[in-house]
Image (cartoon, grey):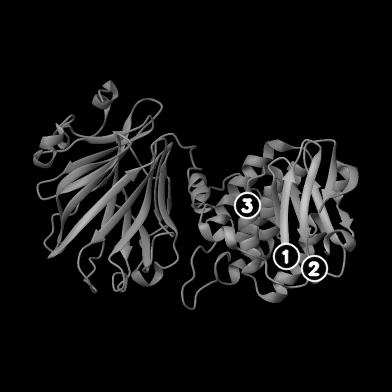
Amino acid sequence: MADPQRRQGKVKPEDRIVGVPGNERRAAKAASIICENPFSRLCVIRNTASLGLALEACSLDAEWSSLRFLPEEDAACPLRFYAYDPLQQDGETHGVSLQGVWGDEAVTLTAVCNPAGIWCRIQCEIAGEGAIAVPPNLHRWLLRAEGVSPEVWWPPCARSTDTLSGLPAAFVQSGSLFAALVRDFDEIEAELAVVHACRDGQATLEYQLLPSALSATRQFAYQLCLDARAVPGAGYQQLIRMLGEHEAFKFAAVGDVPPLAGPLPPLPAVLDEGGWLPFMAEGAPEEIAALVCRQLDRCDAGDWQHLDEGLRWLDRLCYCQQLCETPGGMPFGSFGDGAAWDISALWMPPLLFRAFALTGNPEYANRGIAAIGALPPRDRALVLWHLYQRFGDIYIHADCGEAILAVHPDRFQSMITPEGLDLQIVCAQREEPLRLVLDGSMDSYALVINGEALGVFPTAVLREGIDVPLTVYGR
């Protein structure tokens, strides 16, 4: 456990005791480093009234920064932790459990770190049954680092309880230091929310519960990130990757709507975006969509140096994709809310599908399918017709082995072989040819569909699309 870099940290020595023997941990007057990897470490800390947690991250210059949670010393906030136990699995310590009280209720706070990354999962369980009073800010994480002045943060200001619902995450970045707090959508059963505030220049991530949060369940969870090596101004992209892993994306579907011919509404002209900064100084949603479209056009023309810029702004728009449904709110997969998103919502599926074609990242395809399924029927039909021109009924990215389906087959399975594509597909109810589009790095691909060899096709031909006869797949 010895590490000379620990002594270079910015956490005050009196806040921590390193190497407390296991049988003395619960009586330690300060606290200790619990677990660590090359990028971060988890510590138990204390003030005069309670134990708390610190997630710390190490920069390339071996400087440590800390994201800290300590219950405030305020009689109105009855949350206190008095004991802790490290969590072990296969002989390795990977987290810690704090035990305490919330008024008259017993509380357990568990933190489990990614053994090779920068994310930490926080879970809180409250003993007993029934509803309990909710303090205004249950968990407040403060970012402590020398010389930190927040440059990017979201949301832009503190939210009131009636504007919290639907916000997927709060984050802040200064240089290469990035911190985020993300709702755990897989575990949450109650209505929860996150909020960000900047108090006297102090970066703060606050986690709140809506008034009805603990009426049905007495546990909740969220994810915490602290990265001291993030790309300046673009730390949010790793947040988008995490949100893109939401389980609901895997089950999204476009819906059974026939395509409707017609153009999409035009995007505005792209002005000089040289001074734009995601989340802080940027254009309207349709202007950002126009910028993404222009950068992806350049990539399609072979100018790949614009790919990173295009994806950076596409990921900015992805932050506004609805990841949970609330009564009377926007459906899952929809983009934004209100008239400002009317044009962008129609353009997001084509942009996401194009990003998938360029990168092979299936997250973009999944987001695009969810975005189509969230549109009203007529808009959905229009977008499907627009996509059909380039991606057909089935689009297969051969290099990554992923596919986009705009149809509802009775059976579908694809396998990339050394020679080409082996496809199993049955669409018994379809009465017209399927349009198959395939893209990849090989010069040609042999196609086998339902055991029938259709021949070897140049990739340039497959990229434009071929019609698969009804007699091949309709059985």
Q: Helix, strand or loop at disc 1?
A: loop
The residue identified by callout 1 is: 410
The residue identified by callout 2 is: 428
> Sequence order check: which comes first, mark 2 or mark 3?
3
Cα distance between the residues tagged 3 and 1 = 24 Å
Of 291 and 383, which appears nearest the observer?
A: 383
**Residue at the spot x=69%, y=61% of the render?**
347
Q: Helix, strand or loop at disc 2?
A: loop
Q: Is residue 51 left or right of residue 1?
A: left
Crowd rating for badge 1 (residues with CA inside 10 Å; few <14, some 14–19, many 20+): few
> Sequence order check: which comes first, mark 3 or mark 1?
3
**Residue at the spot x=42%, y=57% of the render?**
156
Q: Quadrant of residue 209?
A: bottom left
Q: Is residue 154 left or right of residue 434?
A: left
Please name the amino acid that badge 2 sits on: Ala
Crowd rating for badge 3 (residues with CA inside 10 Å; few <14, some 14–19, many 20+): many
Of 140 and 192, which appears nearest the observer?
A: 192
Q: Which mark is residue 364?
A: 3
Please name the amino acid that badge 3 sits on: Tyr
Place of residue 123 in the rendered image (x, y in percent of width and height, measured from the top left): 31, 54
Q: Quadrant of residue 378?
A: bottom right
Q: Judge whether 436 appears above or below 175 on screen.
A: below
Place of residue 235 in the rendered image (x, y in percent of width and height, measured from the top left): 48, 43
Crowd rating for badge 2 (residues with CA inside 10 Å; few <14, some 14–19, many 20+): few
Assess whether mark 1 and mark 3 are in contact (beta carbons under 8 angstroms): no
Assess whether mark 3 and mark 2 are in contact (beta carbons under 8 angstroms): no
Assess whether mark 2 and mark 1 are in contact (beta carbons under 8 angstroms): yes
Place of residue 436 in the rendered image (x, y in percent of width and height, measured from the top left): 82, 54
Cα distance between the residues tagged 1 and 2 = 7 Å
Viewport quadrant of the N terminus: top left
Q: Helix, strand or loop at disc 3?
A: helix
